[in-house]
Each structure stands twice: as structure tokens, then as C-alpha cells.
Image (cartoon, grey):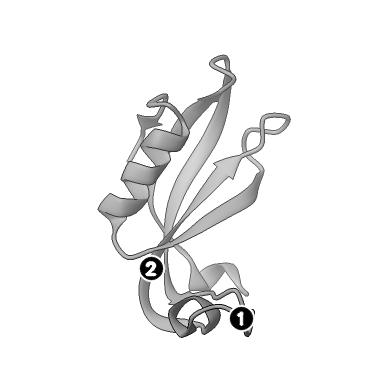
Amino acid sequence: MSSEDWEVVKQGTWLYADEIVCGLRILRHGWNYSSGDYEDEENIREDREGEFYYVEYGSPTNPTEYKTRIGGYKSLEEAMTVTILATHGSISWLT
């Protein structure tokens, strides 16, 4: 997947272990990637085209390196809510 397929729509920082500042960004993408597991329901098993949001967390050992991506959220608001909960409200949004 090329980087042109992902659009950064929001970014900021968060505190890992309440003390290490790490990067954070929310990206918009045209696909929701599935589990691919034949035992899952179709909406979980199959890829879907549309507008979806993913969250990338910067690494605590290299705060500008993004290795963790989660998501497939249906809205920016949903992605932000989940991210705020996951970081215990330690986010400082830059954009």
C-alpha cells in the first residue's frame, strides 16, 4: 500500500506511561480491511470500500515512527473518541 492512499486528517501527540511524548495521527482511507477469517460474519470477514478512519500511534522508543495502526472506524469522531479513551485523555491535537 503506497503512502498516497492514506490521508492524514488529524495529528497530535499523546503520553505513553504518562511521561513519554509520542506522535499520533488519524488517517482517512478508502478501504476497511477485514479479518479474512471464514468463520467471521461477512461484515467482519470481507474488505469494504468507502471512507474509513485509522489511528496510528508513535512508538515510545522513537516517537515519530508509526508502527501501530488500528481502525476501520466509520467517522473521524468515532476514531477520535476511541483514541481519547485509549490514551486516557492525554492527547494534544496539533491539527
Q: What amino acid is at disc 2?
A: Phe
How many residues crowd mark 1 within 10 Å: few (<14), some (14–19), many (20+)? Answer: few
Q: Please state which of the two labelled residues, at mark 1 or mark 2, is closer to the viewer.
A: 1
Residue drawn where x is 46% and y is 36% of the image? 86
Residue drawn where x is 57% and y is 30% of the image? 22
- Residue 7 image position (x, y, % from top left): 43, 63
Query: Is residue 11 shown to the viewer in this render?
Result: no
How many residues crowd mark 2 within 10 Å: few (<14), some (14–19), many (20+)? Answer: many
Q: Is residue 76 left or right of residue 42?
A: left
- Residue 18 image position (x, y, % from top left): 53, 16
Give the alpha-carbon distance from disc 1 to disc 2, as whole Å.
Answer: 23 Å
- Residue 91 image position (x, y, % from top left): 40, 29
Q: Nearer the viewer, residue 35 or 4?
A: 35
Please identify the quadrant where the N terminus is shown: bottom right
Residue under pointer 1: 39
Residue under pointer 2: 52
Which structural element holds mark 2? strand
Q: What amino acid is at disc 1?
A: Glu
